[in-house]
Image (cartoon, grey):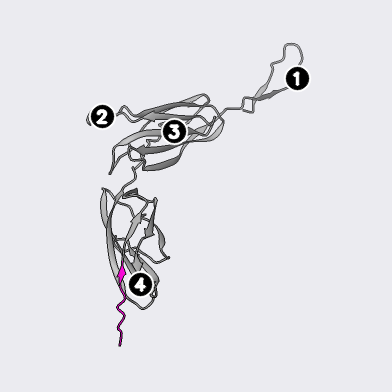
Amino acid sequence: SIVHVSQVNANFYYSTDSICQGDTLVMFDNSTSWLTHPLADWEFNMGNTPPGIVNMGDTAYYAYTAPIFQNETYTITLTATNSIGCSDDATLPIIVLPTPFPILSLPDPSVGCAPFPVTLTNNTMSFGMPIDYFIYEYSDNATIDTIDYIPFTPPNPNPNTVTHSFTDEGFNSLTMTVVDVFGCYAVQSSVPITISKPFASFSMDNVICNGDSLLTTNTS
């Protein structure tokens, strides 16, 4: 009698070997099996804790979304299985980079009359790659400023500040996007700034006798 021995050789590759926290990693199967026993199942263990398990076919997608505070290296394991249950494993490392942690100080005061100039200090922290630049978007005039990060060492004053004069009455906001040198980014939105505008008015009699006092009432 003839005994057929089936064999699987697991192999895969991915879209990048380093990825930002929260971005999607794409993994492509490159495994082989005996032609009469085709591959039937692909399970990717993403190496994190608790383990992310991806079982969606020969092309898989995954994002490391859990907060991290340093560059983390995980080992991805693919288990490829053919139609009669033979399997094999393949592994590759992946480096996950934390996104920056945006911190923009609130203006003091945060309420004023137009034009209302505010200066905010950018205290953003990076747990991974160095910070590269900031993008500031202002709600009152759709202006966008891109400003490079200025390195400094405490206790020296932080030179990374942003100044803007708000002109629209009511609630305004400033949105900051911080980008590191790898391209990882994070957004802090809706730093609240309120512009108040007094409304001056008064009432009075429009006809009075000569010599009488004119009475006015403030209705502002």
Closer to the chain start, of discs 2 and 3, is 3
The alpha-carbon separation of the residues under discs 2 and 4 comes to 60 Å
Which is more toward the observer, 183 or 196?
A: 183
The alpha-carbon separation of the residues under discs 4 and 1 comes to 102 Å
Q: Residues within 10 Å of mark 3 (few under 14, many from 20)?
A: some
Residue 155, image quadrant? top left
Which residue ends up furthest to the bottom in the rendered image?
1
Which residue ends up furthest to the top in the rendered image?
211
Residue drawn at 30 percent across, 83 percent down:
3
**Mark 3 lies on residue:** 136
Q: Secondary structure at mark 1?
A: loop
**Mark 1 lies on residue:** 206
Q: Residues within 10 Å of mark 1 (few under 14, many from 20)?
A: few
Residue drawn at 25 percent across, 53 percent down:
73
Majority secondary structure of magenta residues: loop
Q: Is residue 134 above or below residue 7?
A: above
Q: Amino acid at mark 3?
A: Tyr
The magenta region covers 1-9
Q: Amino acid at mark 2?
A: Phe
CB of mark 2 within 8 Å of CB of mark 4? no
CB of mark 1 within 8 Å of CB of mark 3? no
**Mark 2 lies on residue:** 152
